Image (cartoon, rainbow, N blue to C red):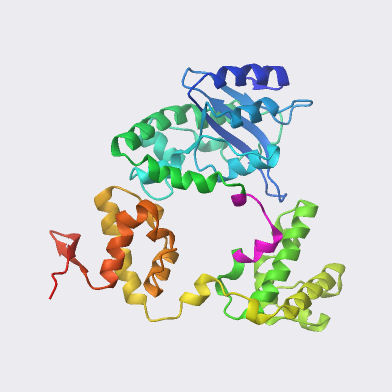
Amino acid sequence: MELIATTQALAETCTRLAAQPFVTVDTEFMRETTYYPKLCLIQMAGPDGTACLVDPLAPGIDLKPFLDLMADEGVVKVFHSARQDLEIVWLMGGLLPHPFFDTQVAAMVCGYGDSVSYEQLVNDVAKARIDKSSRFTDWSRRPLSEAQLAYALSDVTHLVTIYQVLAAELLSTDRGLWLDEEMAVLTSPETYRADPAFAWKRLSGRMRKPREIAVLMEVAAWREAEAQSRNVPRGRILKDEAVIDIATAGPRSVEALGRLRTIPAGFERSRTGGEILAAVERGFARDPSQIALPERARTRGGNNGALVDLLKVLLKAVAEAEGVAPKIIATVDDLEALAEDGTDDLPVLQGWRRGLFGEKALALKAGRMALSVERGRVVVRDVPEA
């Protein structure tokens, strides 16, 4: 197993793969010490037996042939749990693979469980085993060992069989459109644009007051921009716990900042401490009436716990009956929002989800549907009109 290390060899391989109906793709990367992922290896395979490992760290190699293949509309690009791989392609070339297929999402639609792992699909679908001993090795070091190369190649060779089986199952169950909706999210550029202005949303779950949200917006945006400019993880700039503490306490002086338990001693008097205080002031300067509380903060606090529990039981019953992973139908947040108001803009009340589960959930909420137990299984029943 030799690494492709020249542009010419890469172009020749990509030309062969471009003649195939689909290509399986995976990447190995490192991001423990960086904000942006460092691409260390690319793996590809086709149904004709073509398989290759590409060294993106090789001196002088140009990855344009790979990017051209990712943009080729005549070839389906198959990944497993693709979000981070797609982020890498987006950062490399400002494009997203299309047409595109994620076997993890497809497996959820086909009833293999929530967030099913690649190893499980290899076992259950490809009837094979993979050696995971190289999974957490340093992929940036050269030379790579034979064990590393074998492990990396197995990430795409077994994926050929997995894709073929799942694609056939989707075709036989007529659920391809369900998958298309999920793929649209994964292949949207908005999914991968790390705009500092939206960084606060990752941490807003505990916030309940507009002033706290306003400060969180400014401090999180400052941290995100700083991490991007220095290409270091967010936590190297400021831990999540510290950002939340600052948003909650709203310190407006060096002394107040220094009293926070998550701020290291002396940090408040540094240049960074001054920038944090400036971000806090920008938060206080925001108009509280223009701060929209996060959905979780707005809807949690009612007396809908029992209804949410009923919706969870309904979701599990529907998922089992239809052979679909519950998580791909609705999240806990979806159920809580549905229990609160049930507005039509909720994802669970859109498209195929509405027909599969949303209508039943609305009927249950309105008292037109009930849950009962038969032979140890939960069943859904219509409630007769009085």
Kindly report the secondary structure that dominates the magenta region of the rendered protein: helix
Left or right: where 159 falls relative to 277? left
Residue 311, relative to residue 185: is it above or below? below
Residue 346, relative to residue 18: is it above or below? below
> For residue 95, which quarter of the picture?
top right
Residue 283, relative to residue 235: is it above or below? below
Q: What residue appears at the point 65 percent right and 31 percent down from the top-left corner?
A: 67
> For residue 174, which quarter of the picture?
top left
- Tell me if residue 8 can be seen: yes
Left or right: where 114 falls relative to 274? left
Nearer-the-camera pick, 22 or 73: 73
Q: Quadrant of the C terminus?
A: bottom left
Residue 203 at x, y = what percent? 61, 67
Magenta stretch: includes residue 199: yes
Nearer-the-camera pick, 63 or 41: 63
Instruction: Give the number of marks.
Output: 0
Q: What residue appears at the point 42 percent right and 69 percent down from the top-left corner?
A: 337
> For residue 158, which quarter of the picture?
top left
Residue 209 at x, y = what percent? 60, 81
Nearer-the-camera pick, 34 or 134: 34
Q: Quadrant of the N terminus?
A: top right
Magenta stretch: includes residue 120: no
- Tell me if residue 238 can be seen: no
Residue 128 at x, y = what percent? 40, 30
Nearer-the-camera pick, 125 or 32: 125
Residue 94, relative to residue 306: is it above or below? above
Q: What residue appears at the point 43 percent right and 49 percent down from the top-left corner?
A: 115
Magenta-highlighted residues: 190-201
Residue 178 at x, y = what percent? 39, 45
Left or right: where 346 falls relative to 284? left
